[in-house]
Image (cartoon, rainbow, N blue to C red):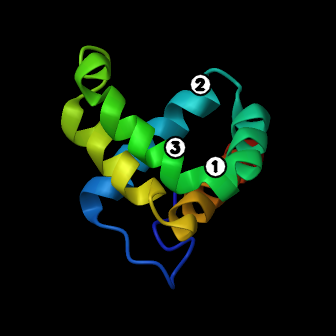
Amino acid sequence: MSADVTPSFDVSEAEQNAVDKVVRLILRFGLSVPAILFLESMRPLNFLGSQFMHIMSPAVHTLVPMAEWDHLAHLLEDRRGVEYLIRRIETAVEEKASG
């Protein structure tokens, strides 16, 4: 997966790693279309969603490493982060189809 999908948005290496993990899970379960539709429909509420992710951190850390969850929540606080995640999913789907 290419790291410079949205060059105008700075993403830390830790955030990139968290996104890569999410994208791999989405592809593994064949949920790329539902994931993109969900992200597109929730775009206006991205900040509230990211804050909810912070609230859920204590409960989720048994399933997902706390640091990765927090990095993903931080990324999604910005609308460009939602766009970044959508583009990464789309890029991964294209790469999987071509290779």
The residue under label 1 is 89
- Measured from the top left, where is residue 11 in percent x and y? 37, 69
Residue 28 got which mark?
2
Of the residues shown, which amino acid type is indicated by label 2? Arg
User: How much space separates mark 1 and mark 2, taking CA atoms?
Assistant: 12 Å
User: How much space separates mark 3 and mark 1, taking CA atoms?
Assistant: 19 Å
Label 1 neighbourhood size at 10 Å, few (<14), some (14-19), many (20+)? many
Q: In the image, what residue occupies the spot 51% across and 43% down?
A: 49
Q: SS for tag 3?
A: helix
The residue under label 3 is 49
Label 3 neighbourhood size at 10 Å, few (<14), some (14-19), many (20+)? some
Circles 3 and 1, Cβ within 8 Å, touching? The answer is no
Q: In the image, what residue occupies the spot 30% across and 50% down?
A: 71
Label 2 neighbourhood size at 10 Å, few (<14), some (14-19), many (20+)? few
Q: SS for tag 2?
A: helix
Of the residues shown, which amino acid type is indicated by label 1? Ile
Q: Is residue 39 above or below residue 78?
A: above
Whichever of callouts 3 and 1 sits on the residue coming sooner in the sequence is 3
Q: In the image, what residue occupies the spot 56% across and 75% down?
A: 6
Q: In this view, does 64 lie to the left or right of 33?
A: left
